[in-house]
Amino acid sequence: MKLLASDFDNTLWFGNHMKKKDIWAIQRFQKHGNLFGLCTGRTLEGVLRPSQPYRLTYDFYILLSGGLILDKNFEVIFESKIPLTIVKEIYKLLNDQDMSVVCQNQVYALYKNSHYMQANEIQSLDELHVEEVNAFSFHFHKNEIEKATAATQKILEKYGDDVAAFQNNQHIDLAAKGCSKGAGIKIIQEHFHLEEDCIYGIGDSWNDIPMLKSVGHGYTFAYAPKDVQSLAEKVVGSLAEGIRDIENKKRFVFFQKR
C-alpha cells in the first residue's frame, strides 16, 4: 500500500477548478488499495467545499500546515493551538497586515487592503473571545512575494520560539511551534503504520518544503520555485502524472519480488 499526501492550491485546486485527469487518477489510485489525502494550510471547510462537486473522498487531512490532522471520518488525530497574545503581537509586528485567523472551526478576517477569502470579518482581534487559536495567516498582493518573504523572516527572527511560519507564494501561514506539513506527514505515517518508502508527497511552493523533506518520494512541478524543485525526486506536469509514476514504481517492485 502506498500513501500520497497532496498539497491543495496549485497542485489539486487551480483557482476555481480541479482537472478531470487528476480526479480520475486519484480515484484509480484509491481503488487499487492506496491512500490519498491532503496536506495543506487550508481549513477543513476550505478543502471540502471546493471538493464536493468532484465527489472526491480523502483518507486523511493534514490541515492548517500540520496544526490539525484528521482521519477520513474527521476524527482528530492531532491538534495544536497558539496563544492569542502571540497572534496580537505578530499582527502589530507586521503593521496590521491583512490577516485571517482560524479558531473554533471558524475563519475570521482582518482586511484593510484586500479580500482574500470569504470569512467572518472583524475589526479587531479583541473580538475573538478566546485564549488560543488554531492557526493564522497573513495575505499580501500577488506582486508582493518578496515582501512576504521578508515578513516571514521577520516573524521567525522574533517569534521563532513560539510559532512556525511558512510562506506560500504571497501568503504566510502560521502554526504552533513544531507544526509543519512535514511533522504532519510523520504523524500520518505512524497512524497508518507505514514505512517511509511507502510515503509520497506532492506540492508546489515553499510551504511544501517540510513535506518534501519528510516523505520517501517527493514530486513537484516546473512552475515551483527552484529550491522546491531541488528537493523533489521528480518534476511532473500534473498530479495525475505523479500518480502514474507512483503506480509504475509499485508494479516495478512487484515484478522485482517475483
Image (spheres, rainbow, N blue to C red):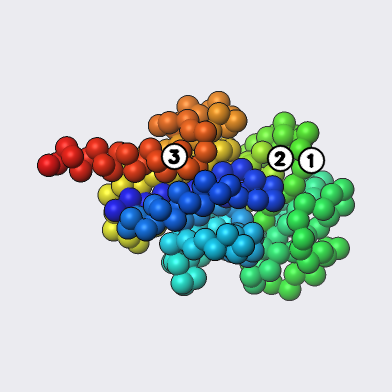
Distance from label 3 to label 2 (Cα)? 26 Å
- Eyeballing the image, is 19 above or below 61? above
Q: Say which amino acid is labelled 2.
A: Gln
Write down the residue under mark 1. Answer: 141
Q: Residue at x 52, y 38 (%)?
A: 238
Asked if marks 1 and 2 touch (Cβ < 8 Å), the reply is yes
Write down the residue under mark 3. Answer: 242
Write down the residue under mark 2. Answer: 170
Q: Say which amino acid is labelled 3.
A: Gly
Q: Of discs 1 and 3, which sits in the foreground?
A: 3
- Eyeballing the image, is 142 above or below 120? above
Residue 206, given in percent of the width and then of the height, sits at 57, 37
Distance from label 1 to label 2 (Cα)? 6 Å
Residue 73, given in percent of the width and then of the height, sits at 46, 72
The secondary structure type at the circle numbered 3 is helix
- Eyeballing the image, is 183 above or below 73? above
Asked if marks 1 and 3 touch (Cβ < 8 Å), the reply is no
Distance from label 1 to label 3 (Cα)? 30 Å
Q: Residue at x 87, y 52 (%)?
A: 112
Q: Residues within 10 Å of mark 3 (few under 14, many from 20)?
A: many
Q: Say which amino acid is labelled 1.
A: His
Sequence order check: which comes first, mark 3 or mark 2? Answer: 2
